[in-house]
Amino acid sequence: MKENTEKKIAAIAGAGPAGLTAAFELMGSGTVHPKVFEGSNAIGGISQTVCYKGNRMDIGGHRFFSKSKRVTDWWNQVMPLQGAPSLDDALIGRKKEFAPTGPNPEQTDRVMLIRERVSRIFYLRKFFDYPISLKWKTFANMGLLRTIKAGLGYLSSTAIKKKEDSLENFYINRFGKPLYKMFFEDYTEKVWGIHPSKLGADWGSQRVKGLSFFAILKDMISKRIGVKQKEVETSLIESFIYPKLGPGQLWETVAKDITEMGGEIAMNSVVSKVHIQGNRVDYIEIEHEGCVPKRVDCDYFLSSMPIKDLIAAIDGIEVPKDVSRVASQLPYRDFITVGLLVKKLKMENETSIKTYKNRIPDTWIYIQERDVKIGRLQIFNNWSPYLVNNYKDTIWIGMEYFCTEGDEMWNMDKDKFIKMAIEELVHIDFIEAEDVIDSTQVKIKKAYPSYFGTYYELDTVKEFLNKITNLYCIGRNGQHRYNNMDHSMLTAMEAVDLIKAGSTDKTAIWAVNTEEEYHETKS
Ligand SMILES: Cc1cc2nc3c(=O)[nH]c(=O)nc-3n(C[C@H](O)[C@H](O)[C@H](O)COP(=O)(O)OP(=O)(O)OC[C@H]3O[C@@H](n4cnc5c(N)ncnc54)[C@H](O)[C@@H]3O)c2cc1C
């Protein structure tokens, strides 16, 4: 039976950005009491910060950037913008515009840093700007022949447009075939494990919409003539905000605020059954560390658990065969990060960006080299100096590998994997093996909801779920959409708005990140 309380109960699956945003927003309603159930022992889902011997890892590198004012205001309300230099700013005398009354990151933790995005492509053992810029250095790195080929390829792509029925054609239409082959083909295949010719164009339109050779040219010209930041493609905005101790810090802070306001968050609590009575969820069951499943009655159920698991957990009604088939075969891509603590990198900073000890300035680097499996490299020092226990004397790196649960990479012995990762970094001339001080490995399941296979039949599942009137699918895997944190939060905000308005029409939730206004142009 439902607890005897005047407030309605909203059960929420998942304490990631979506689940926590929903709980936080519901606290403000005054009439609905949120109960969050998190299956793991970590707050923040994929956006958690993993701590290893005082060094913090951001899985994937989470840039806090949104086109939505509602989201950016929300972030800044939880963690105010810095009002004084951070450690690295102070060490190199970097000038920035700080918030006039903002906190000092040297004195407090609850602070958002203002960071610069520097991400480059490593290809032919050289650095290229990302997105590709039309600088002399780019052409020098490519060499004369490749430059001519790229130019001709681009011209031909402007004259003859391919039908955009694959990710490969999406890129070729915007950059031409040679540039696509150089800078997109291999990386995309590493991410998805499938050749871009077999992937739908949807991912491209969400990730790099608006980004093209022409947009890059326009940006270069507008920078020259001093056009204001607001008028430039958002793809080319180069700063972002970032919690002092990584993305997980923001979500841990939100979780603390929720419990202080009276909300409930239960950890290690897996939602294993979603019971439907008529067309409503009347209770869910929670499995907690091997105990007998516990029944939790609810008036609303907000689910950020993967759609695949949600459908499998439905009980009390018969799930149509087609819905089960589509959901059970939804594809995902998983992720392994190797954290490496090193004394130094082999390469020096050759950019004009001033850095501490002249270290390379990149937040992350796309590894486009074909002879290694690594897909991307994070330099955590450059995300926040406070992620690193000893910022001055060590460099804390994240080596990212894309894989699929159960494949050879996923099943590889941890020590063997770390050894391979170190060898790869030595092979591409980033480090000397003897400079490695420490290492660790983190595996993340279902990091990417994939856009192939039964993804194209997802509407069947959505239609079925939408008929369950008090069920709201929110977040990234909760919608099987390539949602960033802001999109995941917006789905939760939309769901709470609907609950407050007493509406059961879920259109607004599913519309997040499908429309132009939500799309980012560079990732
Ligand atoms: C490599 C990478 C880089 C990224 N970079 C960025 C970036 O730069 N900027 C950005 O904004 N976003 C970025 N993202 C996206 C961001 O991580 C997600 O949008 C966000 O974490 C999704 O939030 P969520 O709450 O929907 O899901 P999740 O973060 O996946 O959280 C879901 C939670 O639900 C829990 N759960 C699952 N099943 C159950 C169950 N049955 N019962 C109870 N709990 C359950 C999980 O344990 C998890 O904690 C990146 C993602 C990846 C993988």
Image (spheres, rainbow, N blue to C red):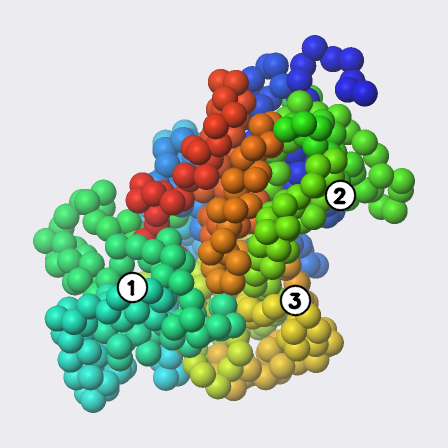
Q: Quadrant of residue 38?
A: top right
Q: Position of residue 306 (x, y in %)?
A: 61, 48
- Viewer can see residue 30: yes
Q: Position of residue 224 (x, y in %)?
A: 12, 57
Asked if residue 281 lies left or right of residue 512, the reply is right
What residue does disc 3 label? 405
Element on which disc 2 rests: strand
Q: CA distance from mark 1 to mark 3?
A: 30 Å
Relative vertical location of residue 219 with respect to residue 123 in this rendering, above or below: above
What residue does disc 2 label? 272
Amino acid type of the residue tagged 2 in the rendering = Ser
Element on which disc 3 rests: loop
- In the rendered image, the residue lying farthest to the left is 225
- In the rendered image, the residue lying farthest to the top is 6
Task: Work out whether mark 2 precedes mark 1 in sequence or the reverse, and give the earlier one.
Answer: 1
Amino acid type of the residue tagged 1 in the rendering = Glu
Seen from the viewer's position, the closer of residues 96 and 182 is 182
What residue does disc 1 label? 164
Q: Which residue is located at x 49 percent, y 79 percent?
A: 430
Task: Work out whether mark 1 precedes mark 3 in sequence or the reverse, and give the earlier one.
Answer: 1
Ligand 1 has an atom within 8 Å of the beta carbon of the residue at disc 2: yes
Amino acid type of the residue tagged 3 in the rendering = Glu
Seen from the viewer's position, the closer of residues 429 and 260 is 260
